[in-house]
C-alpha cells in the first residue's frame, strides 16, 4: 500500500463526507515522521485538533480522535536515511535498521 493509498470508511450519501474514520488505515514511511493526525497534507485539517503520534515507538498507532490506524512501513537497510528533526526518531530508525539487518541475516 502506498502512503497515499487509504482504505476508507463509507461516505455519507448526502454530504459525501466519511461517516467514520475508524476504518481508515494509512501506511506511512520513516520520511514522513514526525507523524501528525490529521496529516499536514490532509484536506481534513479541521476534522479534529492536530496531534503528534509517536508511531516510531511501536510501529502502529491509532488516532484517539478519529480512529485512523497508522502503520509504519518496514525500514529498508539499503535506503538512504531520511533527515530527522527529532533525535528520538533518529535513534528508533537506527534500531529498526539494526533489527531488520539481523532478521535478513537469519533468513
Image (spheres, rainbow, N blue to C red):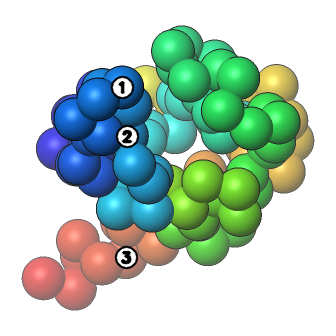
- Name the residue located 37 percent from the left edge and 40 percent from the top edge: 18
Q: Which residue is mark 2?
A: 18
Residue 85 at what x, y percent from top left? 82, 25
Between 90 and 56, the residue placed more toward the observer is 56
- Name the residue located 51 percent from the left edge and 15 percent from the top edge: 43
Q: Secondary structure at mark 2?
A: loop
Please identify the quarter of the rendering in which residue 49 is found.
Answer: top right
The mark closer to the camera, 3 or 2, is 2
Q: Quadrant of the N terminus?
A: top left
- Give the mark, 3 or 2, whose residue is nearer the N terminus: 2
Residue 96 at what x, y percent from top left? 53, 62
Between 97 and 34, the residue placed more toward the observer is 34
Q: Secondary structure at mark 3?
A: helix
Residue 56 at what x, y percent from top left? 65, 57
- Distance between the Cα atoms at labels 3 and 2? 42 Å
Q: Which residue is mark 1?
A: 15
- Name the residue located 52 percent from the left edge and 39 percent from the top edge: 30
- Name the residue located 44 percent from the left edge and 54 percent from the top edge: 20
Is residue 10 found left or right of 62 in the rendered image? left
- Is residue 36 shown above or below 73? above
Q: Which mark is residue 102?
A: 3
- Distance between the Cα atoms at labels 1 and 3? 50 Å
Answer whether residue 79 is visible to the viewer in this image.
Answer: no
Q: Secondary structure at mark 1?
A: loop
**Callouts 3 and 2 close, C-beta under 8 Å:** no
- Is residue 61 shown above or below 6? below
The mark closer to the camera, 1 or 2, is 1
Residue 103 at what x, y percent from top left? 30, 78
- Distance between the Cα atoms at labels 1 and 2? 9 Å
Amino acid at each position: 500500500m502506498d502512503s497515499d493509498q487509504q482504505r476508507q470508511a463509507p461516505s455519507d450519501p448526502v454530504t459525501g463526507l466519511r461517516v467514520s474514520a475508524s476504518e481508515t488505515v494509512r501506511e506511512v514511511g520513516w520520511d514522513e515522521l514526525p507523524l501528525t493526525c490529521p496529516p499536514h497534507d490532509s484536506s481534513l485539517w479541521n476534522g479534529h485538533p492536530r496531534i503528534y503520534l509517536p508511531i516510531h515507538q511501536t510501529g502502529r498507532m491509532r488516532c484517539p480522535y478519529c480512529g485512523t490506524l497508522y502503520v509504519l512501513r518496514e525500514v529498508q537497510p539499503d535506503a538512504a536515511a531520511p533527515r530527522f528533526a527529532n533525535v528520538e526518531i533518529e535513534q528508533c530508525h537506527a534500531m529498526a535498521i539494526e533489527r531488520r539487518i539481523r532478521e535478513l541475516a537469519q533468513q
